[in-house]
Amino acid sequence: MGNGDRIDPWSSDQSTDYDRIIKQFGLETVDPSSLPNPGMLHRRGIVFAHRDLDVVVGCIQRSDPFGVLTGLMPSGRMHLGHSMVIDQVRWFQEQGADITVTVADLEALATRGTSLSEGRQTAISEYVHNYAALGLNPDTTNVYFQSSRPEVQRLAFTMGRRTNLSEFEAIYGFNGETNLAHVQAPLVQAGDIIHPQLDEFGGLRPIVVPVGIDQDPHLRLTRGITQKTNWFNVNARKDGGMTVALSVQADNASNLGILPGGKLDVGVRATIFDRIEAVLTELGFSDLLLNPKHGTIEIPGATLSDRSSIRMVLLALEREMGGMGLMPPCSTYHRFAVGMTGDKMSSSRPETTIFMDDEIEQMSKKVMRAHSGGQPTVEEHRRLGGDSSKDVAFQYLQFFFEPDDSILDDIRNNYESGRLLAGDVKQICTDMATEWLLDLKEKRDQWAGRLDEFLAPDAI
Ligand code: TRP
């Protein structure tokens, strides 16, 4: 795999060839009509891809528990680009999710040299404060620090046993020069993503991680490791139905009825099969073909749509038998908003984005200077119309500031037909952004001094 085929989570230079990324990494595309109460970013195709989102949609429909895990890098100022994930987190919370927020203070230390105390300060004053203002509900939100949650670090080590340097080289392009603190960061992130499933953090339930596409390598790594730890695999049979197969590994062999010499312990295996049979019968499958010797159970009557409930009961059984019983994380991916200058948005270049606490005047200047999709002269613009796909002000209305789809459509139509000039769209954007920033500031003021409500007990 060449360098251009990789996604580097630590580079600000991200590919926006979303179709290629979907194909190359096997993502599914998001169909907004399959979601209950789709949010603005779903309806507008901005959240464009996912892994296993249907599992979460099932939870929403059945009012089953599920969680969201999101993470923030505690360095720099929070800007519009960061707010997109929080928009989705809030949407999931409204649909019933509990929320866990990782402060990636160890990652910031490892990859940017940010001290833990600096990281803490930035996380709370810059990020948590704005998350509160953006409407996260503290009752079901828990913010924690990587550095003060030993369970996460323990998981990082446990999961590290299931991968190696070659895999890290393939996924991240690490090489002999790579700093070792940097190598640890993805394993800690895998620990972040998995730990809400531990019994002490809410227990077995689907966890969805909404991210920009730059974070997908971590999700691939985490899903791969998770699957390697599972004791039971559930797969479709060629001729219809599903098959459950035991996955015998070095550290579960004796639990699964393999004697030290490699021979089958028929008694232990029979007991396991009784337990599997019991949980599958309880799910409603009566016709089961048991093959204890080969370690397989066929369920002819099961369909693909039964797969996740079958998996769920088997993960619970795995936990009862002493395994970790981990689900692969679900994830969603959003497109990146274009920078105001027409190229990439980056916090190190303030002119490319709007910060959550920008003054109205600063924001207006940036919008006025923003890259536009207008024609060179008014005469041409009236005749040919503007290009909304290149117009930053229009896109910011679409991504951030105009919640009403029909108003947005009107603006697009009027711009593309030449009735609205680029300057008019910029004025609309400035007005909406002014309202948005003032509202956010007012809410920040309301939350000042109360941010502890968002912190987990181990973060206070
Ligand atoms: N790596 C993320 C970033 O650079 C931060 C992060 C740490 C994170 N743990 C996470 C993001 C878990 C999502 C899920 O921003």
Image (cartoon, helix red, strand yellow):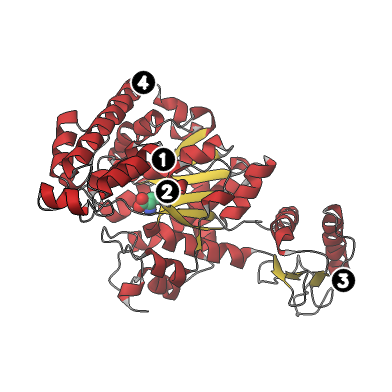
Q: What residue type is labelled 4?
A: Gly
Q: Residue 203 carries which label?
A: none
Q: Which of 396 and 3 is in front in this view?
A: 396
Q: Which amino acid does label 2 sit on?
A: Arg
Q: Which of 54 and 378 is in front in this view?
A: 378
The residue tagged 4 is 449
Cα distance, mark 3 to mark 1?
Answer: 52 Å
The residue tagged 2 is 44
Left or right: 213, with 338 as reference point: right
Cα distance, mark 4 to mark 1?
Answer: 36 Å
Which of labels 2 and 1 is toward the front?
1
Q: Would you say the beta carbon of the disc 4 residue lies within 8 angstroms of ligand 1?
A: no
Q: Which mark is residue 289?
A: 3
How far from the left and from the top, in percent, is residue 440? 32, 28
Neighbourhood count class around disc 4 (C-alpha, 10 Å): few under 14, some 14–19, many 20 upward? few
How far from the left and from the top, in percent, is residue 1? 37, 79
